[in-house]
Image (cartoon, rainbow, N blue to C red):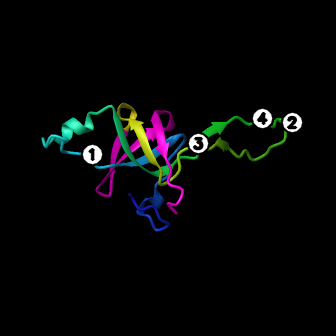
């Protein structure tokens, strides 16, 4: 389990829109029969899993309050939040994941639509 804390080094990163930053779990490199698999085999699987590290603000919602459009008002963008939360275990589609490396750690950025399942531990925090 990845440690998600206030002094996390990833606090400088901002995930945008409906994207989710995931730390992939270490895939099993050994089969049940004892054969060792090269990393290229395990990375090509269709479905992967990992821990949600950061989430974006969500889907932007249109501004529907145009009662007096001639008045200059500061528009604040409203978002519909994502279902994923920090610390969740996510099962996601590998083909939609974008791999990045940040401070020598491997992460993937996945749109929420590519997440198939979330497992949330209620007693995590």
Q: Along the polypeptide, which appears first: circle 1 or circle 4?
A: 1
Give the secondary structure at mark 2.
loop
Question: In which quarter of the view is residue 45 placed?
Answer: top left
> What residue lies at 75% left-to-right and 47% top-to-bottom?
74
Q: Which mark is residue 104?
A: none
Q: CA distance from mark 3 to mark 1?
A: 29 Å
Q: Is residue 51 left or right of residue 14?
A: left
Q: CA distance from mark 2 to mark 3?
A: 26 Å
Q: Which mark is residue 64?
A: 4
The 10 Å Cα crowd at callout 4, few under 14, some 14 to 19, many 20 or more, is few
Give the secondary structure at mark 4.
loop
Q: Which mark is residue 58?
A: 3
Magenta span of residues: 98-125
Q: Along the polypeptide, which appears first: circle 3 or circle 4?
A: 3
Residue marked by disc 2: 67
Give the secondary structure at mark 1.
loop
Q: Along the polypeptide, which appears first: circle 3 or circle 1?
A: 1
> What residue lies at 58% left-to-right and 46% top-to-bottom?
57
Q: CA distance from mark 2 to mark 1?
A: 54 Å
């Amino acid at each position: 389990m990845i440690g998600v804390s206030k002094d996390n080094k990833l606090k400088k990163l901002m995930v945008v829109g409906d994207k989710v930053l995931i730390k992939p779990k270490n895939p099993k490199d050994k089969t049940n029969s004892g054969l060792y698999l090269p990393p290229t085999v395990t990375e090509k699987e269709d479905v992967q899993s990992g821990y949600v590290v950061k989430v974006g603000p969500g889907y932007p919602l249109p501004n529907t309050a145009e009662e007096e459009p001639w008045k200059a008002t500061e528009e604040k963008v409203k978002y519909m939040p994502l279902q994923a939360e920090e610390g969740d275990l996510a099962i996601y589609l590998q083909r939609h994941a974008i791999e990045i490396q940040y401070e020598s750690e491997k992460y993937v950025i996945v749109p929420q639509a590519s997440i198939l399942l979330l497992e949330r531990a209620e007693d995590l925090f």
